[in-house]
Image: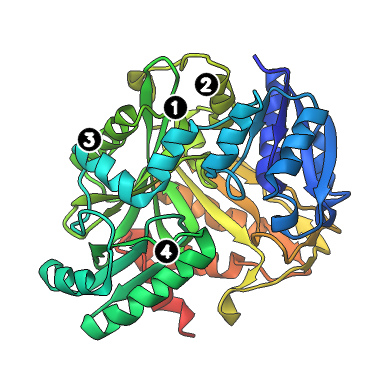
């Protein structure tokens, strides 16, 4: 087992990992930028090192500085959290070259599954349904113009690298496709350093369902059931829940087993998430895999009783999974609201600033994962998420009622947050009945 772990991240996820390390009897080492200097959550680590200025490109994304901190801190492993370098295969490779365990998949598995084009090929080999589209990368405009009518408009232009909706454009006709190709390539090149794209049939009004998986280095791989992440805006999730509502038992079984087949074929180990879209007829299609822990992992923890961060650490240390597939039972319903420092009334404009008051909610089945406190300044340099409100109840109806109550209890003053919008969503008949799709928020609210 590791004696010391460096956490190459910040905020809520760093605090989450510090806590898991403490419970496992492992010392933790934090890194921080100048913008995060003095943050209270850093006190939960055993040591902390400054790695640069506020900009992520000068601190949290600086591989050499993180490795230097790891060597000074005398750690045996690095946990990347999510975001920043979590899916950077070069970083994972540097860790291995420095004889530091990267708490995640191998660089080879990360590269293969992180590239959407190679991941689609792997999915097909594992007999996992994929969205109809180009067999490989689109080499030129003429190739795209020839394929699109065969797929049938609308079509989706997607970057092969990266995620988060960047390098992705919908084209309703040939004229729009020409523009979409240029825009997607330019955005992908700027965001990921790669302009490679491919083409897919655009599945209209889909749901977003993802499967949590974890695999050890002894050939064991399991799923921890699925999460529904349909409530999103511009591919950024606002509300997640497990199990996915209005999903038949047959589809649930098939989608989860498909995810396990994929990770086994890829010889993947550690935690990961296999993402799918589900059409109005219940057909599901693989879209990508996130080779890291997800923001919404607490939803799965609540319905399975399995601590995913501890499991990640144990698997990285070479331990076999302590549970088998038959041991993982869905218990009740869990739901998570991502609390972001954004103003939904002004097109979700970020609202950095100082928090003057915060009152976290409590009660049966309520969990609030956050690193912020009174006097904390939300920085403009990083992601706007300031906390995650999670509830766990026997049924979905009870989970919705509990979340509504908890959101009313949660008081955050000094900045605007997404709480008012999330309260509206939870009261909307379409959400309650779950007759929604991934465009629901844009269609319902953002035009106002």
Foreground mark, 2 or 4, reads 4
Single out the mark in the foreground, 3 or 4: 4
- Asked whether the beta carbons under mark 2 and mark 1 sit within 8 Å of each other, the answer is yes
**Residue 378, located in which quarter of the rendered image?**
bottom right
Within 10 Å of disc 3 (Cα), the crowding (few <14, some 14-19, many 20+) is some
Q: Secondary structure at mark 4?
A: loop
Chain-order first, disc 2 or disc 3: 3
Residue located beneath label 1 in the image: 269
Above or below residue 258? Residue 53 is below
Q: Mark 2 or mark 1: which comes first in sequence?
A: 1
Determine which of the numbered discs, if any, sits on residue 126 in the image. Answer: 3
Q: Mark 2 sits on what residue?
A: 315
Identify the residue at horizontal 83%, vertical 64% (top origin).
Answer: 356
Comes first in the chain, label 2 or label 4: 4
Which of the two discs, 4 and 1, labels the residue nearer the N terminus? 4
The image quadrant of residue 421 is bottom right
Residue on which the image places disc 4: 195
Q: Quadrant of the N terminus?
A: top right
**Left or right: 232, with 366 as reference point:** left
Could you say whether the residue bearing mark 3 is in a helix, strand or loop? loop
């Amino acid at each position: 087992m590791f004696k010391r772990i460096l956490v190459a991240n910040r905020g809520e996820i760093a605090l989450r990992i510090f806590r898991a390390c403490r419970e496992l009897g492992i010392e933790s080492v934090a890194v921080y930028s100048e913008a995060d200097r003095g943050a209270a959550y850093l006190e939960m680590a055993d040591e902390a090192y400054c790695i640069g200025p506020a900009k992520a490109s000068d601190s949290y994304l600086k591989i050499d500085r993180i490795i230097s901190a790891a060597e000074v801190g005398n750690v045996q492993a690095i946990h990347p959290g999510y975001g920043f370098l979590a899916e950077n295969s070069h970083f994972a490779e540097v860790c291995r070259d420095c004889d530091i365990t990267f708490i995640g998949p191998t660089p080879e598995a990360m590269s293969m599954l992180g590239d959407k084009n190679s991941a689609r090929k792997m999915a097909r080999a594992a007999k996992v349904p994929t969205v109809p589209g180009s067999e490989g990368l689109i080499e030129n405009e003429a190739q795209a113009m020839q394929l699109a009518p065969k797929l049938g408009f609308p079509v989706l232009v997607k970057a092969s690298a990266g995620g988060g909706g960047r390098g992705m454009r919908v084209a309703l006709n040939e004229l729009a496709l020409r523009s979409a190709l240029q825009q997607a390539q330019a955005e992908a090149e700027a965001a990921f350093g790669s302009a490679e794209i491919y083409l897919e049939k655009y599945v209209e009004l889909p749901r977003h369902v993802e499967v949590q998986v974890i695999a050890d280095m002894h050939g064991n791989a399991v799923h921890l059931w699925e999460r529904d992440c349909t409530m999103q805006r511009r591919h950024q999730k606002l509300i997640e829940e497990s199990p996915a509502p209005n999903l038949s038992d047959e589809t649930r079984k098939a989608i989860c087993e498909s995810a396990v087949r994929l990770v086994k074929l890829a010889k993947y180990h550690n935690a990961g998430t296999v993402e799918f879209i589900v059409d109005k007829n219940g057909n599901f299609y693989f879209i990508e895999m996130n080779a890291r822990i997800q923001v919404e992992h607490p939803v799965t923890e609540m319905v399975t009783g399995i601590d995913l961060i501890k499991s990640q650490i144990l698997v990285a240390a070479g331990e076999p999974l302590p549970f088998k597939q038959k041991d993982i039972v869905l218990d009740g319903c869990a739901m998570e609201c991502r609390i972001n420092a954004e103003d939904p009334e002004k097109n979700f404009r970020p609202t950095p600033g100082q928090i003057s008051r915060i009152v976290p909610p409590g009660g049966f089945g309520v969990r609030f994962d956050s690193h912020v406190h009174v006097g904390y300044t939300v920085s403009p340099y990083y992601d706007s998420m300031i906390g995650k409100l999670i509830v766990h109840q026997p049924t979905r109806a009870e989970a919705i009622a509990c979340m509504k109550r908890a959101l009313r209890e949660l008081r955050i003053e000094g900045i605007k947050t997404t709480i008012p919008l999330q309260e509206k969503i939870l009261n909307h008949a379409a959400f309650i009945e779950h007759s929604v799709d991934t465009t629901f928020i844009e269609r319902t609210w953002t035009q106002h």
